Amino acid sequence: MWATGHVEAAESSLDSFEIRLYETGGVMVHFKINGKEKSFEGDPEMPLLWYLRDIAGFTGTKFGCGMALCGACTVHQDGDAVRSCSVAMKDVNGTSITTIEGISAGPEMHPVQKAWMEIKVPQCGYCQTGQIMQAVALLKQNHNPSDEDIDTAMSGNLCRCGTYQRIRAAIHQAAKELA
Amino acid sequence: MNQIENFSRRNFLKTTFAAGSFVLGARLLQEPLWASPADAATGGATFQPDLFVGIASDGTVTIVANRSEMGCGSRTALPLVLADELDAVWAKVKIEQAVGDAKYGDQDTDGSHSVRSFFDQMRQAGATGRAMLVTAAAQQWSVPEKECTTEPSYVVHKASGKKLGYGELAAAAAKLPVPKKEDVPLKDRSQWRYIGKDNALFDLEDIITGKATFGMDAKMPGMVYASVEHPPVLGQKVKSYDDKAALKVPGVWKTLTIRPFTPPHHFQPLGGVAVIADNTWAAFQGRKALKIQWDSSPNSSYTSAEFRKTLTSTARQPGKVARNIGDVDAEFAKGGKIIEAEYYAPHLAHASMEPPVAVAEYRDGKVLAWAPTQSPQAVQETIASVLGLKKEDVICHVTLLGGGFGRKSKPDQVAEAAVLSKELGKAVKVVWSREDDIKFDFYHSVAAMYFKAAIGGDGKPTAWLQRTVFPPINSTFELGAKYGDDEMGLGWNNLPFDIPNHRAENGPADAHIRIGWLRSVANVYHAFGIHCFTDELAHAAKQDPVAYLLDLIGPPRIVDLGAKPDDDDAKTYPLDTARLRRVVEMVAEKSGWAKRPSGAGRGFGIAAHRSFLTYVATVVEVEVDGKGQVKIPNVWTVVDAGTIVAPDNVRNQFEGAANFSTSLALLSEITVTNGAVDQGNFNDYRLVRMGHGPKKTNVYIVESDAPPAGVGEPGVPPFAPALFNAIYAATGKRVREMPLSKTKVV
């Protein structure tokens, strides 16, 4: 969407640097992202968030707080919503990760995303991918959530623009769609 | 308004538009700073557009957005206005985001004025394009222009049934002279296809699918990551530091000091020690391992709890007069019933969901930056000033902003990236942690206010004195600034009440942390004080707060604010009490005010405030349980912002403002101890979460043909006083300081 090639042309940030080998405690972990096999060798304590964003290029997952307080970095690990800022790479081994980029099986949007479109939820939009990932996980466990169920499930996801009312409406609408 | 020129006749347009494109607007050539491989592939030209529209021979319409998108919708609204007047198919319009350049006019996306300031210009640009396309078609068909009309992206001659697409006409239109403004008809409102309808944000799908590029997502080839340890106290410098442990962190390869700012701090970097690494995480970890000795700063003695006493006592002293009507002192001297009150509101942080971040590259005396900035021209000026460059040699691309709220008008983090890039010879991405964001903000100012009213026999005030004291925003730009002249217009020197004796004053206060604009700025505390004090007077008079408020506003009239004759804003947007009365009356009706008794833990409160030229009245309903927990079942808010471009987005802005305001009214506070900010993340700088904010915010828009006013900020000011007035109605407890969480209400 941005006009020049400067942003999009960059694949990896590290092409001009020597990649350091992690002599002390480096690990090799194997996992899946959006169905594809991946492996990572490096700092076992690196949060999944930074692997996704800086190394694997899945930037739909956002950094907000680094302490699992805001939910902007929410992804699914084996189907459960987790805060990727607080999941170490060593704990990703053998698991399957889904990000916003992989939430829909085909070219169509996920029904939750469609509801977000129809209700016109976002303002700045930065937190919304995390909100959607949390909402998808909620609707997997609870097909017909009440307002209270939604408030409880979504209370870990901050939106500074304050789109909570529309998020709640969109989740109800998606629940109907999925029923 | 910028001169509209037909730039197609010049040979400027190589990359953005295909050959033969019809391009209209104040488009200005910007030579590329250096050719990237991508540039070379397209002929080595880079163009930096102004407000303009381009039509390619394939019919593609491209419109430039010159204001930043931080969630308020201006990147959608302004191009939409242009597309409407051009009569283009909106769904097929492409938007190109402008880089920073003073030639493009004011790009600082603040003050809720994107639509207000550019509405006419965008209409004119679109209408001019449409008129030229009509001329081109009429010439081709040899028919009079007035027999031709348009339907989206086509010129049509109804009599003959002929029809040509805009793309087919582009080459011919490009050869035409630009008609004079007075010869270009604008659409009648009834002909608008998009303005005033519920259009989605242009970037909606990209946002929802995770494809949108925020500042946090920007990359440049070969870039490295940096995290900066800033001095904990404003003005501290690095005495010495030990980076041995930091350099052992995997992925960290260097540390660098950033020179401290030259006072006044303006938007310069704070200074400190930067850790350079392969990725963000490694940079964060490296920082934790740094050992830094800081020297002292005069601001080390600043403790906000102590400072509060200073502010409060200053508010009891006469200050600088901001507005004076009649003689309050003479009225007070008459004796009779006097009511006084003190109000207090703390420092706040912006806490945009996206922390400050930027990527920049310095090369050959020039800088290229990508940043989530509200003000790309401030990026140019700041980097130019810090690195000793010409601002024209700083190119700033604007990404989407993950929230801004005023913080991202100040580009200190972009300057950090440029400074580090110059040292390293590589592109650098600076990422602020949440703790950096909360601890090194340009804070919303703390404020103490004092009110005094003499009450007449009818319960209405015969005299009203108000004093406000706060460290001013100007302290960021001017050493030793103590008075907030600019803040007076933000809810202080424009009290719209019908009171014969009134004086508004401002007392002096020093700043010890960086002070800046936050959504609706001084209106936050001024509206809190004024509208809670109004409610106090209503209850003292044993009158209904809505009836009392209408009485205070008085008869419909234009309030004389002493504007200078050349003040065009005052002429176009006079303070009209008829409009203020209308939003109050409407919100009372919509909320069923008259039928809703307060008491026994349930209460309704009202406030009405005009800010950013928009009239807003809000009623808040609260429920307070036996433990003092507050619930907000309903909010009703009525907005008169004149002509509305995007009504659904306006409703979204006001729903959001209710939540933003719930945070500051109930939860948020920045405190400072010995010069250092105490809070650091969302555990101690608390924001409202789903389920704790208003359950239902009902937004009503007054139908109006008046010129467009602001919508991003005006929802904020009346909310907190309406909430505190509702708390009083529910509990009988008058709370005069924010946030409410500091006071036990039951």
Image (cartoon, coloured by chain):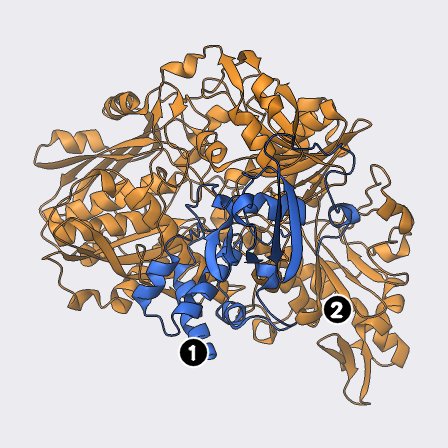
Chain colours: A blue, B orange
> What amino acid is found at the position of numbered circle 2 in the picture?
Arg
Q: Mark 2 points at which residue?
A: B130
Q: Between B72 and A155, which is closer to the camera in this rendering?
A: A155
Q: In this view, does A171 lie to the left or right of B134?
A: left
Q: What element carries label 1?
A: helix
Up-down relation of residue B466 to residue A168 (above or below) = above
Q: Mark 1 lies on which chain?
A: A
Label 1, on which residue? A176
Q: Within the image, what quadrant is residue B645 found in? A: bottom right
Residue at horizontal 80%, vertical 54%? B5
Q: In this view, does B24 lie above or below B589?
A: above
Q: Position of residue B649 (x, y in %)?
A: 49, 62
Q: Which of A34 and B635 is in front in this view?
A: A34
Residue situated in front as seen by the camera: B457 or B543:
B543
**Label 2 chain ID:** B
Crowd band around label 2 with a 10 angstrom C-alpha radius: few (<14), some (14–19), many (20+):
many
How many numbered marks does the figure carry?
2
Give percent across and percent down for residue B399: 64, 48
> Mark 1 is on which residue type?
Lys
The answer to whether residue B558 shows anywhere in this view is no
Are labels 1 and 2 on one chain? no
Q: How far apart are marks 1 and 2 (CA)?
A: 44 Å
Q: Where does the image place residue A17, in percent across and percent down from the top left?
A: 76, 32
Query: Is there any visible trace of residue B362 in the rendered image?
Result: yes
Q: In this view, does B730 lie above or below B86?
A: above
Residue at 50% of width from left, 12% of height from top? B293
Q: Regarding mark 2 in the picture, which secondary structure is present there?
A: helix
Select label 1 or label 2 by which is in front. 1
Identified at 45% across, 57% down, the residue is B653
